[in-house]
Amino acid sequence: MELSFSPADIAARYSDIGAGKAKRATSQLVILGVLAGILIALGGASTNTAVYGISDPWTIKTICGLLFPFGLGMVVIMGAELFTGNCLIGISLLDRKCSALQMLRSWVIVYLANFAGSLVVAGSCAWFGQLDLGGGQLAVYTMKVAAAKCAIPFQNGLVLGFFCNLLVCLGVLMALSAKDSAGKIICAYLPVAFFVMCGFEHCVANMYYISAGLMAKTVPAYVELAGEMGVDLTALTIPNFLINNLIPVTIGNILGGLALAWVIWFIHLKNRKPAQV
């Protein structure tokens, strides 16, 4: 018995799965989208907690790369709805299994639900003591990371977002090749580890990282400690979050996911007899 599916099988399977995601009931999209946002945010919270006391950038990137991918693993195993992974619905669209309107509807609902789930975790960490670790140093580190993300140039966010979601979507497809949970987690793990170590930008992860920083900034004790530690929080504002990060990164994520979707469709599905929408 074969232990994995072939690339052509993966493409065909996702074409059907993506169509199901595009046509899923709104209530299900919201609940599963909030769940995915929470799971990815918990991955972000765990990485910040693991490295806030470390100063060496190489060590920070390596540890984050080893920890964060389990967030996508949980999303895959639990069948949650993650906006970045759902950019692969482009395969279903090209294969004529769903309409553009159905795809866009799913994207919008899941994106907002992911954001809501991220905010739940960010607010819980910032306002209920989790960021108090290290005498508040975790809060300062969280704000420092968020401020740096708010200061990246638009074009950087676009390109870093593109390669991020190329890898995330590759992880989603690779997870479909496995027939057991361990295989799915391993397949989803490696591409995400690559994007984290490379410093690429993921819009849903940033919904946590930057929101947590913004919420921590509302706590006077955290801001005072950041000043004492010489951390500049000038860039950490809501406009910078949206304009410098979330918008370009989201666009880049969409383009990266659709680029991979087109490649998979063109190689494996283009010459099949198309189904009706």
Image (cartoon, rainbow, N blue to C red):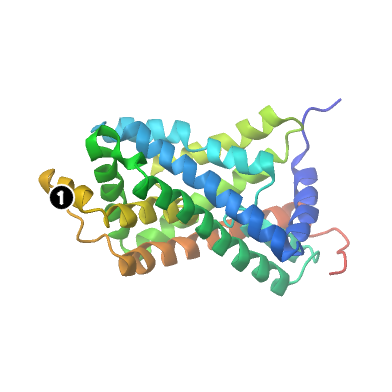
* Residue under label 1: 224
Q: Residues within 10 Å of mark 1 (few under 14, many from 20)?
A: some
**Residue 32: percent from left, percent from top:** 65, 53
Q: Nearer the viewer, residue 219 or 78?
A: 219
Q: Which residue occupies 22% across, 48% down?
A: 222
Q: Which residue occupies 66% across, 70% down?
A: 105
- Left or right of 153: which side holds 79? right
**Residue 158: percent from left, percent from top:** 42, 62
- Left or right of 51: which side holds 28? right
Q: Which residue occupies 48% across, 47% down?
A: 41
Instruction: Say if 93 sits above or below 51 in the image.
Output: below
Q: Which residue occupies 62% across, 44% down?
A: 75
Query: Does residue 134 appear in this view?
Result: yes
Q: Pick the quarter of the image with the C terminus.
A: bottom right
Examine the image and state in which quarter residue 211 appears: bottom left
Amino acid bearing label 1? Glu
Under circle 1, the secondary element is: helix
Residue found at the far top of this picture: 1
Residue found at the far bottom of this picture: 101
